[in-house]
Image: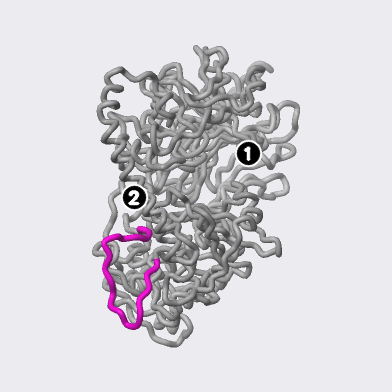
Amino acid sequence: MEILHSPLHFFIFITLLSTVAELSRSADIITLSQPVRDNETLVSAGGKFKLGFFSTGNSSNRYVGIWFYNIPVQTIVWVANRDDPINGSSGVLQIETGGNLVIVDGAGRAIWSTNTTNLASDNVTARLLDSGNLVLTNESNNGSGNFLWQSFDHPFDTLLAGMKLGWDRRIGLNRYLTSWRDSDDPSTGDITYKVELQGLPQKFLRSNTLVIERSGPWDGIQFSGLPLNPNAIIKPEFVTTAEEVYYTYQLNKDSTITRAVLNHSGTLQRWVWDNNTQWAVVHELPNDSCDVYAKCGPNAVCTIGDAPICSCLTGYTPKLPQEWAMYVWSSGCVKKKPLNCPKGEGFKKLKGVKVPDMLSYYVNRSISLDECRTKCLKSCTCTAYTNADIVGKGSGCLLWYGDLLDIRKLIQSSRNQNVFIRVMASDLGNHKWKLWLVVAAVAASLSLAILLLLCFWRRRTKKCLGKTSEVQSGSEDNLELPLLDLEDITKATSSFSSLNKIGEGGFGPVYKGLMSDGVQIAVKRLSRNSRQGCDEFKNEVLLIARLQHRNLVKLLGCCITGEERMLVYEYMPNGSLDSLIFANRAGNSLVWRRRFNIIVGVARGLLYLHRDSRLRIIHRDLKASNVLLDSEMNPKISDFGMARAFRGDQLPDKTKRVVGTYGYMSPEYAIDGIFSTKSDVFSFGVLVLEIISGRRNREFHHHDHNFNLLGHAWKLWLQGEATELIDKQMEDSFPRSEAIRCIQIGLLCVQQRPEQRPTMSSVLRMLDSESASLPQPKQPGFYTERFNDQIDGETSELTSTTLDGR
């Protein structure tokens, strides 16, 4: 062997050895026997990204991160232990014996882990891909894309090509960006960038809870708040399915090096590596003053290039003119005068805008723009409408109610949405003289028609708003229902303040009140525009005043003064059942024992209606929102406006006017209008399955099929997997046999044929006895798979009431 005589030869030899050692460790894989220590790195197979330990600024804290390999400026795109740094250079990134990827410090303590379960450590490896994604995979499945864990599911402050920003609904995973604490501290900061799912999905840039910028919803081509094709660097995509909702982008050229970065200063920037020399910002949010959320306040539009940039929508005027004169626009605009609903109104087209935020909205993907306009006109609170999707000729319907917030005019607007703002006829511009001639020609006939309609309205009003004695003594029995003074109710509800409004249904608004004697009340006030309110008012007075049961809401009295008609109930402080099992506001109220007690209580209330009250009463609109909860979480059935009463053993009836709520109506009632006590039994069965699963029947989605909740429960029952239906939010320690028994009772109640369903007395016996044998259920009603457009569309209700408390 040749001896190295000179120091220079020895230096070259040592350098070569170090280089070989580094290259041998700079593979793209971590195995059980091959970890990454603090002085070692991984490099992706194509040499695009590098993984290793790093520090920031003058700090001795060490982090495991990923950065671009072929860029001289170290640009971090992901950090594993951002909130748990290692002090010193003793850290190791390794596969532990359980198969997880972990970071351990010099003392052998795990300070970060992938926390993935059911791993086989012998075959698990971690690999750095050319996309910048660090993946944990089983070597036998390597390359299949079926990763056990991936860093792309846990973003940092950077969005790379191929990463998903948004939701995996199957596992409840929400991928979003979070800023650094500051320029030298990668720990979790206050700025976030998320896809939020309320209404149509949108991207929100926030500082804690404060909104900085909003993208607007995806209009089928792009997010409505972004300018048309801001750059040709990327191809944005937005995916919405029953399983996933996310935004991602791909590169137009594979050679492009780009990243979107969320800064701790509150901006989102698109960076591109420019000619292999430096990073350059090509786009930024907020990009201008109009990108700032709600810059001009409610009912105003922001337009860059105008002076001033804020202007009120047609038919609106500044709320605080003095502030607007000083270019302070946050107070926004208000209507110049109330709309003459539903007469003399139209819509003003606002071209090429970011659509308003969805503060109060309605979405239906299945109707046309003309149908959308008609639907908006029918509601006096509807203030604007547009297409939900602008692809082709446009489709779907998006309605707004109340104030319109965060509208901006876009400079490049040829493919952006047009929003139609509701205005008075006088705001639509000057009419042509021919129109006035037509109006004059038909004036006489219109006058006659108006007179006829007025007579009809007066007769209807008189029928509904008759004298007090007509309500109290109009039947053979004197109801002896207390009559309350309008002045007392007005005072109790603070003059029907919007702050006291707790719900609204077909009857009208519902207000919370406090009487002078300290009794809390809920007041249902008949709306003058209500189509069903008159009939509901009389129906509830005639029916519920005679009913007394601990599981029925108690009617305290009514008020009949002038044209005012109100029903006064006991107040239910825990609101409606739907807010408990669907919105999960009560947290610890989701325990099984409370759910079971609610099921039993509703069953007892229905049994009283069907058998034990003076009249046999069919509710016809039993649903989660019509079950209210008192201070002790006892259920009380409410809303008897749709109920029907029968005497003795009267046979099932048939109606030409089907009322109720889709998803709770029995097949024979929804299709043929035939209703009986077994119709209520079907609704009860739906309610039982909803309480157990925590899922709505009509809004239920599953990645393996398109059945509703009833169909899903039936499939699980046939497969012997009924426990899979139980709400995952419940604690583990509860009698599963009791829960399965309730599932079986629910399936018995929703059977296709009414004669197969049990009576409510049988249901209570089955609930009260654990030893009684239960029959096997048969196929439920509506056991057919839905089309995708039915699943994605909004639920449709014939009646709808939403309450926070009563």
Give whichever of 486, 248 is nearer the camera. 486
- Reading the image, the residue beneath label 1 is 209
Give the residues in magenta: 643-662
How far across and down, in percent of the image, does residue 374 sit? Answer: 33, 38
Give whichever of 203, 130 is nearer the camera. 203
How far separated are the C-alphas under marks 1 and 2? Answer: 52 Å
- Report the residue at 50% width, 73% height from top: 479
- Report the residue at 35% width, 83% height from top: 648
How far across and down, in percent of the image, does residue 699 sit? Answer: 40, 54
Q: Is residue 484 left or right of residue 662?
A: right
> Comparing marks 1 and 2, which lies closer to the viewer?
2
Q: Residues within 10 Å of mark 1 (few under 14, many from 20)?
A: few
Magenta stretch, overall SS:
loop
Q: In this view, does 459 lie to the left or right of 502?
A: left
Whether 440 is drawn above or below 433: the answer is: below
- Report the residue at 48% width, 54% height from top: 526
Residue at the farthest bottom position: 771
Per the image, label 2 sits on a secondary structure element best described as: helix
Per the image, label 1 sits on a secondary structure element best described as: loop
- Reading the image, the residue beneath label 2 is 456
Label 2 is placed on what type of residue?
Answer: Phe
